[in-house]
Amino acid sequence: MNTSVKTPSRIQTAMQAIQHRIDVAPGSKLPSIRRLAELQGVSKSTIVEAYDRLVAEGAVEVKAGSGFFAPARVRPFRLAEPGLQLDRAVDPLWIMRQSLAGTDSSLRPGCGWLPDDWLPGDVMRRVTRSIMREGKTNVTAYGNPQGFAPLRDQLARRLNERDIAAEPDSILLTDSATRAIDLVCRFLLQPGDTVLVDDPCYFNFQPMMQAQRVNVVGIPFTPKGPDLEFFATACIEHRPKLYLTTAVLHNPTGINISLGTSHRLLKLAEEYDLILVEDSVYADLEERPSPGLAALDGFERVIQVGSFSKTLTAAMRCGFIATRSDWIEGLTDLALATGFGVSDLPAQVTYRLLTDGSYRHHLDGLRPRLARNMATTIEHLENLGLTLWARPDAGMFVWAELPDGLDSSQIAQRALERNLILAPGNVFSVTRSANHHLRFNVSQCGDKRMFDELAEVMKNK
Amino acid sequence: MNTSVKTPSRIQTAMQAIQHRIDVAPGSKLPSIRRLAELQGVSKSTIVEAYDRLVAEGAVEVKAGSGFFAPARVRPFRLAEPGLQLDRAVDPLWIMRQSLAGTDSSLRPGCGWLPDDWLPGDVMRRVTRSIMREGKTNVTAYGNPQGFAPLRDQLARRLNERDIAAEPDSILLTDSATRAIDLVCRFLLQPGDTVLVDDPCYFNFQPMMQAQRVNVVGIPFTPKGPDLEFFATACIEHRPKLYLTTAVLHNPTGINISLGTSHRLLKLAEEYDLILVEDSVYADLEERPSPGLAALDGFERVIQVGSFSKTLTAAMRCGFIATRSDWIEGLTDLALATGFGVSDLPAQVTYRLLTDGSYRHHLDGLRPRLARNMATTIEHLENLGLTLWARPDAGMFVWAELPDGLDSSQIAQRALERNLILAPGNVFSVTRSANHHLRFNVSQCGDKRMFDELAEVMKNK
C-alpha cells in the first residue's frame, strides 16, 4: 500500500481527525501539515487537501504565518454574510454609518433624513425647557411599561384621523421605528422563517432581517406597489410569515402603494396567513394623508410602526407600534425583557409638540419646502441625463436611473473621494439588481454644488 | 378486521392525516371526530385519541364549542413557557410590571430601584434646561452611531479609576443596561446555546435569555459568589458560551463576588472558552469600588455593561457596553440594525452630570442614606423573625429567609391585596428553589408601615 496515493477515504479520515481536535479544543492551534501527515501515516498532500476542504467549509481558520486554528467556540455574529463579500460601498450599514459620521462639509444626497437646519431645534429647546420648569413632569423615574399614556392617546387620535382604528391601549411606545420593527419581528418570527420585502426597499430592512436570522425574499416593486403576481407566487413557494414595507412615501422610490394594490395585498395576506408590517415614518410628509394598509384592515393583519425621528428629532427618539390589542401584552413583555421599557422624557417632549401645534406648524412649513426641492432636484437630475423611475407626490426621496449604463456603486465609490455621499441602488436591492439607480434625498440637494460634483463623477469614467 | 380495535398504527395514521391538514391550511377548522372517523374508516375513539395527542403536543388547538383548529402559522412568541404555567405572582415580568404600574400609595419593598424622591430631579431639570439654552448642543440630529463621544471618554476615565483598562473606542452607548445585555447576547449567542446565571439572579435575566432562545443553567450562589465546583461541572456538562452575573452588589443578594472567586471564574472561563458578562448597574453605590471581573481580565473574556438608570434617572436612559475593541464595530452594526442608534440627549445630560460634580455629589449623599436604611431594615426584618442570607456592604438589596417555612410566593400574593409589592424568592431562581426568601430594597423600606403590613401578612396564614 502506497501512502502517497490520495484516496477520498484518507482525506475524509484526516478531516475527521482534524474535526475531532476542533471539537475538543476550540480556539486552539491545529497540528501542522507535516506533523499531521506523520500522525496519520498519510502524505502531506492528503493533509493539505483535508485542511483545504475544512477551510472552505469555515470549520478551520487560517492565520497568516501561524498555521491552522480551530475556530473559537464563541463566534460573534456578523451582519455581513461571509461568502458574499459585499463591497463596503454597497453594504447597507456602511452607507448609514458614513451618513452618520460624515463631516459637516460632506454633501449627503444619499442620506435618509432632513438637514439639521430643517428641523425645529429652537422649538425643541423651548418646549424641553418649559417641561423642565414644571415640577410635576417625570425626569427620574421609570415610566409606564407601555409608554407615556398621554402620547399614546395622541397617537391613537392621529391614527383615527387617518381612518385607522387604533386605541391608546393598542399602542406600544418604543425608542424608534427600527426598534419597533425589531420587536415585532422577535414577537412573530422564528429563526429560519421567511420575510418578504420590496425590491428595492429601505436598506436597513436587510441587516434588520439578518439580525432576526430569517430568510428574505425580494418582491419586484412597481410604481403601484409590489408586483402582485410575484407576491402570490412567493407566498406559495416560500410560505412567508411577514411582509415588511413602507406603504406610504416608499423608501427608496418615494411613491405610495396604490389603493387597489393595498386591497389585493390584504386579500393575499389572508389567503396565505401573512402579517403585513407597515413602516410609516415618512407618512406625515404628505399633505393629504394616504390610507396605507392599516386603514383598510383595522389591525387584523396589519401592524403599523412609526416614529418622529425623520420629521421632528432624532436626538430624543420616540417610536411606536400600533397593533391588535391582544398582542400588546406580549410585545410589552418582550420590550421589558430586551430593553426594560423606554425613556419617558422624549415621549413627554413629543407629546407637547403634538398638542401645542408646534409639530403641525413645522410640517406646514416643511411640506412646501420639500416640494420645491423635489421639483428642482428632478430638473437637475434630468438635465444630467438621469431618468426618473416615478414622480413622487410628496416626501424627500427620488429614485432615478443613471444614463449610459453607468454603475451606481462605482459612481458612489468615486463620489466619496469628493466628500459626496450617494446612495447606490444595490444598497436597497436584495437581489442586487438596481445597479443603475441612485436614491436622492431632495432636502439634501439644495446646494447646487451637489449636481456639479455628480456631473464630474459621472464624466470621469 | 375490526375497525373498532385501536392499534397504535391507526392512531398514528389518523394523526398524520390531521397533520397534513394542518400543514395545508394553517388556522383552519379541522374535521369533526365523526367526520374524520368516516373518512379514515376508523372508530371515533381512534380519532379522539389522535386529537388528544396532537392537542397535548400543541399541534392542534381546541376552541370551546367550536371544535379543533389548526394553529395559525404565525404564532406570537410568549416569554412565559407554556407547560410551566407560572403563577403570575412569581413570573419575573409580572413583578416588574406591578412595580412600574403600581399606584403612588403602594409600598414597594420588592421593586428594584430608588424612590423617586431619592433621585436628583431638580438637578436633572436644571442641567437639562442649561443644555437647552446652549445653541450648539444637538437636539434634532442623529448622533454618532457609537454614542456621544464625550460621554464615552468620561465612562472610560471612570472605568480606568477602577483599574479597568477601557478606552472610549471600546465603549458603545445603549439606551439601558438591559438593551446592552440584549445586544451582547445577540452578538455572541446562537439560539440553542447555553448560558449560566446565578441561582438566584436578577429576575429579568430569565425572560432576557428566553428572548434569546437559549438554555439557561443556574449556578448555586454562595456568599462568595457562584459555587465554583458546580460552575466547573456545568461547563463540562452544558458547554455554555456565556456566564451572566452582577459581580458587584449582586442582585438579589447584595453581596460582591470575592476576589478569589473572580480569579477562579476567569480561569474557568479560559479553560472552557466562556465569555463573562458583568452587569455593573449598582456598582456606583459602593464607597470604595470593588474591582469586579473586568479589572482582573482587561476585556479578554469579560464584557461589562452598565447604566445610570438605577443611580441617576430612568426617564432619560443611558447605558453602555465596554468590551474588546475588535468587537465594537460588529456590536455597533447590530445596534444600528436593531435600533438605529440611541438618543443623543440623555447621553449629553448624563455627561454634564458626570463632569460638573452633580453625580458625585448625589452619590455622596445617597450612600450613607442607603447604609442607614440598610441597618434599620435588617433590624426590622430580624425582629419579624426573618434570617439574613448575608450582610451586604452597600447597595440597596437585602436577601432574607422567612421563618417557619413560610412560602414567599403565597406571602407576596397576599401582600398584593394590601397594596404591598414584595419580591418573592422564586422570581429570582431558575430552579424555583428560593421559595422561602424575599428580596428587600432598603430604600423602599423607610416607611415603617411596610413592616407592620408584612407582619400582618405573615401572621394571616
Image (tube, coloured by chain):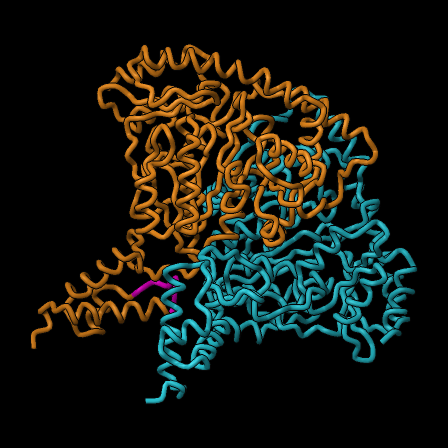
Chain colours: A cyan, B orange
Would you place residue B148 above or below residue B19 in this image? above
Q: Answer above or below: position of A435 versus A286.
A: below
Residue at (71, 53) in percent of width and height: A282
Q: Is residue A190 visible?
A: no
Residue drawn at x 74%, y 43% as measured from the top left: A312
Could you say where residue B201 lies in the image, as x and y percent from the top left? 39, 35
Where the N terminus of chain B falls, by quadrant? bottom left
Above or below for B104 versus B176: above
Name which residue lies at 33% across and 27% down.
B413
Give the residue at x 36% y 11%.
Answer: B452
Across and down, in percent, residue B444 comes to 47, 19
Residue B181 lies left or right of residue B124; in this view the side is left
Classify residue B93 by image quadrant.
Answer: top left
Compared with B417, B429 (above or below) is below
Residue A228 part of the magenta-drawn span: no
Looking at the rendering, the stretch of residues picked out in magenta corresponds to B24-30
Q: Is residue A358 left or right of residue B93?
A: right
Q: Nearer the viewer, residue A411 or A152?
A: A411
Looking at the image, which is closer to me, A401 or A354? A401
Count of picture labels: 0
Q: Is residue B29 magenta?
A: yes
Q: Position of residue A60 (x, y in %)?
A: 47, 67
Give the camera-side residue of A418 and A364.
Answer: A418
Comparing A292 with B274, the one in front is B274
Q: Position of residue A326 (x, y in %)?
A: 45, 46
Q: Main secondary structure of the magenta part?
A: loop
Q: Looking at the figure, which quarter contains the C terminus of chain B?
A: top left
Q: Is residue B265 visible?
A: yes
- The quadrant in which residue A135 appears is top right
